[in-house]
């Protein structure tokens, strides 16, 4: 009977027929473990039925149900991608409890089938890179255990780096209350070897789910633990048996009924534990020790992190071509007279720490000279670390040694040569860039955009990828980065002349006034394009034709462009649409300069000379954005080639966890699935490590060390669910919402059943009133790499949307900052 298969008939190779959950239950049944009897409606039945059970299948279903003894059953999804080693799909498809009767069973099976395509399931698959093609749904039908107590057992406590403990969470009634986060369960940490209790915490078990509905729990039962020490030892023994059977740690759902324990599910633990975090932390420290200078190194979290906060491996490898001494940035410096140190040919001034780019301030001067004349004031930064977030070189260090004093005349001469080159370049570069540099680059892009990559041989596709990396990030970038340097030079000249008469602070304000309204060239003017679309003078299609190669977080190659997915664009437009229009008359740039020059009491000659620099400043600030516009068009082609590799080799988004050097291996037929899984897991763990904004090489143990709460913040102590520390605006909801919100919020809610998962995708962290470490919401939060805290009653009433909060998921602390 290929449409149905009883548990005892399920074999190891049947996963495509019965799905992950069905396979696990069948194998445990055959191994003699205590699994309630049941059967699977197979994926063959799903594919044949087209969503509706016909008479033939209904008759088979009825027969199997009667042989099971009728009565109440649990009907649970078992998709082919469920309960894997990397993705748990915890709670993403349907579970219907207390189903009784043949018609109810038929409807429950059809409901499980439909749940494969719900918004929450699609959002989970998209975030986890699970391919939609070939998915199918089996359904488990199992005798319902009317549990007195139920819950979850992790055979390895995720918070125990020693691996000596198990974690058990339990509550009264059916286990749905625990896994859905409807209650804060009792929590027990027990010894693996004998089940003795190391720690116990009483939960808030105010409701019990039964086969017929939900009931309140008496005050007496709320105030006592629902498992005793004998039961905990017995459950730990059962956990050891399951772990021994699978030869790996397991996430087990269990029930206590009829004086014994029953196994309802056992899937791989897909989330990182404390031992994994400690291994990654130590690896980070050892890597940074090798990168540190003998005289000490300071890393600062500034600049690049604003546009590339947490790059995936492919993006980070590719972007080296832009940032290294032999890349676009280094070539730009060479063009204007600098000589980067040879070591910078294959290095950048940035290192990843905890998965995020930090500027290596000890290395940064070497991008301009092999023997730098000026350093940063490291001792000052050590005393006041926050100064390193806006670093400025210390001119006094040019006299630090005899060698530097002897090189001082050469340094001064090179600075003068640099100033002359910049001054000369600024006279002609704007026209050259527009007329000589952009047109041939754009012509190449337009030709490449029309090419059908699906028809290319793999080696030719690799050549296309390599060509566009070099053409965009080296050849074109060496030119498109020059407007930034030219604008900085003009800004320094103006600021130096205004500092004395106006003072440093007013001089900086004046610069801001002078640069207001500087625009890119019309074809690259994104802000104007947005305004025109909102005003109705530019259609959506026209906007996407002009700016479709741009997108949200566009420096990350894994992020879609607007031409691929305009969801983030819709959110941007929605935010702009409510903004009031302003009709205040703006002064011209010339009028603004006349006013500031008069305020500074500049003589006519100096005013006229600086007016030229003001014009250059505005020109090159606008041209900087024009250059980025075209650079991102070439960058979109790099993404296009990577997407073709991903599609062709069925990597499900995994290509972005590879690096360019991996692509030849991929073409040669080597399976890189394990590499992708390992890098994905390591990256999520690294991002969960708490890292201070400034890191010193003599205190690398600060990586992973809990940071103090901001001064004046209100601290709320909850239950730690998923490690990591983030700050952001709260999004407070009492019910799941399908309305799109600006990404980067911290989701605050009463609890999280699977309907909330689409909101996880754009969230930075999760705060819940109730729920345990082993609830579905906590498991998915850890898979997504979201810091999470629970056990804060009425938190969604205490906080308001927009308040800035800090979530420390490792310690279970929520700090209210505003």
Image (cartoon, rainbow, N blue to C red):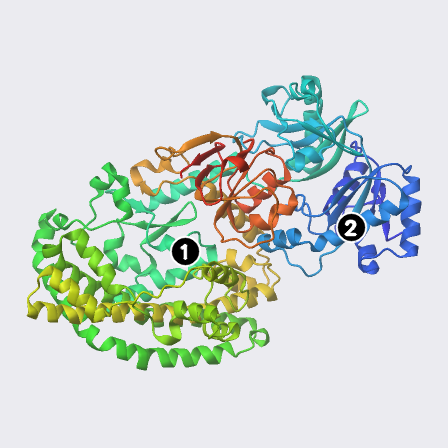
Q: CA distance from mark 2 to mark 1?
A: 42 Å
Q: Residue at x 43, y 48 (%)?
A: 355
Q: Foreground residue, 213 or 125? A: 213
Residue nearest the observer in this picture, 330 or 640: 640
The residue that disc 2 covers is: 111
Q: Is residue 120 visible?
A: yes
Residue at (49, 70) in percent of width and height: 548
**Other residues around mark 2 within 10 Å, as few (<14) / some (14–19) / many (≥20):** many
What number is the disc on residue 112? Answer: none
Viewer-side label of 2, 1: 2
Q: Earlier in the sequence, mark 2 or mark 1?
A: 2
Q: Is residue 85 above or below residue 643?
A: above
Location of residue 502 (image quadrant): bottom left
Position above or below: 209 against 296: above
Q: Position of residue 283 (x, y in %)?
A: 43, 41
Residue 395 location (% of width, % of height): 14, 51
Residue at image point 47% right, 54% down: 312
- SS at circle 2: helix
Pick whichever, 74 or 251, lies toward us: 74
Locate residue 718, reporting x and y percent: 52, 30
Q: Quadrant of residue 591?
A: bottom left
Residue placed under numbered mark 1 in the picture? 308
Locate residue 790 relative to residue 710 in the image: left or right.
Answer: right
Task: State whether residue 368 appears in this view.
Answer: no
Residue 483 location in percent, x, y? Answer: 27, 69
Image point (17%, 69%), residue name: 613
Count of picture labels: 2
Helix or strand or loop: what does disc 1 sit on? Answer: loop
Quadrant position of the C terminus in the picture: top left
Residue contact at pointers 2 and 1, CB within 8 angstroms: no
Q: Is residue 436 left or right of residue 131?
A: left
Mark 1 packing: few (<14 Cα in 10 Å), some, or many (20+)? some
């Amino acid at each position: 009977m290929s449409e149905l298969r009883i548990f005892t008939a399920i074999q190891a190779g049947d996963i495509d027929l019965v799905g992950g959950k069905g396979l696990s239950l069948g194998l445990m049944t055959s191994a003699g473990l205590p699994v309630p009897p049941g059967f699977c409606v197979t994926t063959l039945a799903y594919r044949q039925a087209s969503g509706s059970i016909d008479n033939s299948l209904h008759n088979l279903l009825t027969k199997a149900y009667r042989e099971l003894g009728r009565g109440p059953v649990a009907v649970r999804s078992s998709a082919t991608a469920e309960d894997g080693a990397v993705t748990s799909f915890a709670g993403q498809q349907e579970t219907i409890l207390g189903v009784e009767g043949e018609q109810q069973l038929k409807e429950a099976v059809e409901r499980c089938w439909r749940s494969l395509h719900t918004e929450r399931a699609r959002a989970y698959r998209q975030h986890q890179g699970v391919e939609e093609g070939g998915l199918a749904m089996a359904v488990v039908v199992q005798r319902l255990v009317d549990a007195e107590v139920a819950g979850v057992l992790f055979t390895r406590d995720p918070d125990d780096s020693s691996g000596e403990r198990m974690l058990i969470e339990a509550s009264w009634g059916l286990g749905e209350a625990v896994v859905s986060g409807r209650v804060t369960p009792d929590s027990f940490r027990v010894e693996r070897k004998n089940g003795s209790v190391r720690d116990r915490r009483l939960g808030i078990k105010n409701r019990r789910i039964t086969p017929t509905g939900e009931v309140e729990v008496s005050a007496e039962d709320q105030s006592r633990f629902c498992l005793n020490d004998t039961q905990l030892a017995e459950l730990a023994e059962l956990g050891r048996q399951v772990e021994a059977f699978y030869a790996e740690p397991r996430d087990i759902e269990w029930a206590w009924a009829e004086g014994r324990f029953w196994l309802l599910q056992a899937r791989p633990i897909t989330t990182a534990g404390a031992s994994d975090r400690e291994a990654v932390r130590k690896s980070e420290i050892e890597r940074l020790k090798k990168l540190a200078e003998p005289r000490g190194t300071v890393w600062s979290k500034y600049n690049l992190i604003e546009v590339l906060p947490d790059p995936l491996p492919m993006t980070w490898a590719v972007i080296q071509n832009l940032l290294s001494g032999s890349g676009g940035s280094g070539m730009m410096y060479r063009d204007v007279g600098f000589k980067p140190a040879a070591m910078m040919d294959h290095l950048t001034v940035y290192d990843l720490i905890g998965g995020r780019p930090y500027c290596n301030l000890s290395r940064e001067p070497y991008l301009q000279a092999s023997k730098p004349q000026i350093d940063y004031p490291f001792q000052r930064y050590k005393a006041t670390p926050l100064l390193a977030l806006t670093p400025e070189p210390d001119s006094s260090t040019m006299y630090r040694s005899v060698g530097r004093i002897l090189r001082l005349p050469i340094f001064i001469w090179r600075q003068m040569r640099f100033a002359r080159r910049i001054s000369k370049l600024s006279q002609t570069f704007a026209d050259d860039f527009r007329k000589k540099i952009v047109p041939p680059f754009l012509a190449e892009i337009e030709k490449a955009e029309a090419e059908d990559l699906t028809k290319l041989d793999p080696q030719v596709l690799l050549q296309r990828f390599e060509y566009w990396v070099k053409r965009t990030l080296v050849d074109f970038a060496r030119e498109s980065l020059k407007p930034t340097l030219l604008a900085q030079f003009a800004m320094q000249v103006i600021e130096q002349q205004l500092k004395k008469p106006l003072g440093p602070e007013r001089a900086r304000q004046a610069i801001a006034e002078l640069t207001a309204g500087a625009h890119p060239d019309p074809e690259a003017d994104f802000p104007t394009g947005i305004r025109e679309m909102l005003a109705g003078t530019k259609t959506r299609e026209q906007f996407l034709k002009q700016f479709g190669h741009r997108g949200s977080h566009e420096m990350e190659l894994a992020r879609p462009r607007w031409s691929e997915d305009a969801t983030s664009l819709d959110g941007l437009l929605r935010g702009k649409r409510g903004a009031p229009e302003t009709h205040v008359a703006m002064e011209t740039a010339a009028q603004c300069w006349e006013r500031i020059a008069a305020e500074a009491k500049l003589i006519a000659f100096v005013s006229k000379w600086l007016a030229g620099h003001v014009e250059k400043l505005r020109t090159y600030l606008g041209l900087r954005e024009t250059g980025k516009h075209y650079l991102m068009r070439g960058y979109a082609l790099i993404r296009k080639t990577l997407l073709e590799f991903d599609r062709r080799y069925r990597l499900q988004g995994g290509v972005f966890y590879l690096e360019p050097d991996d692509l030849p291996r991929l073409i040669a037929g080597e399976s890189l699935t394990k590499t992708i899984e390992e890098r994905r897991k390591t990256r999520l763990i690294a991002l969960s490590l708490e890292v201070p904004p400034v890191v010193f090489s003599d205190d690398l143990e600060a990586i992973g060390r809990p940071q103090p709460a901001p001064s004046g913040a209100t601290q709320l102590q909850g239950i730690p669910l998923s490690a990591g520390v983030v700050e952001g605006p709260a999004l407070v909801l009492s019910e799941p919402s399908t309305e799109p919100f600006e990404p980067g919020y911290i989701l605050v809610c009463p609890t999280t059943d699977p309907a909330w998962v689409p909101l996880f995708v754009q969230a930075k962290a999760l705060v819940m009133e109730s729920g345990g470490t082993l609830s579905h919401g906590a498991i998915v939060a850890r898979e997504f790499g979201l810091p999470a805290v629970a056990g804060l009653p009425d938190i969604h009433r205490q906080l308001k949307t927009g308040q800035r909060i800090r979530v420390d998921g490792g310690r279970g602390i929520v700090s209210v900052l505003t």
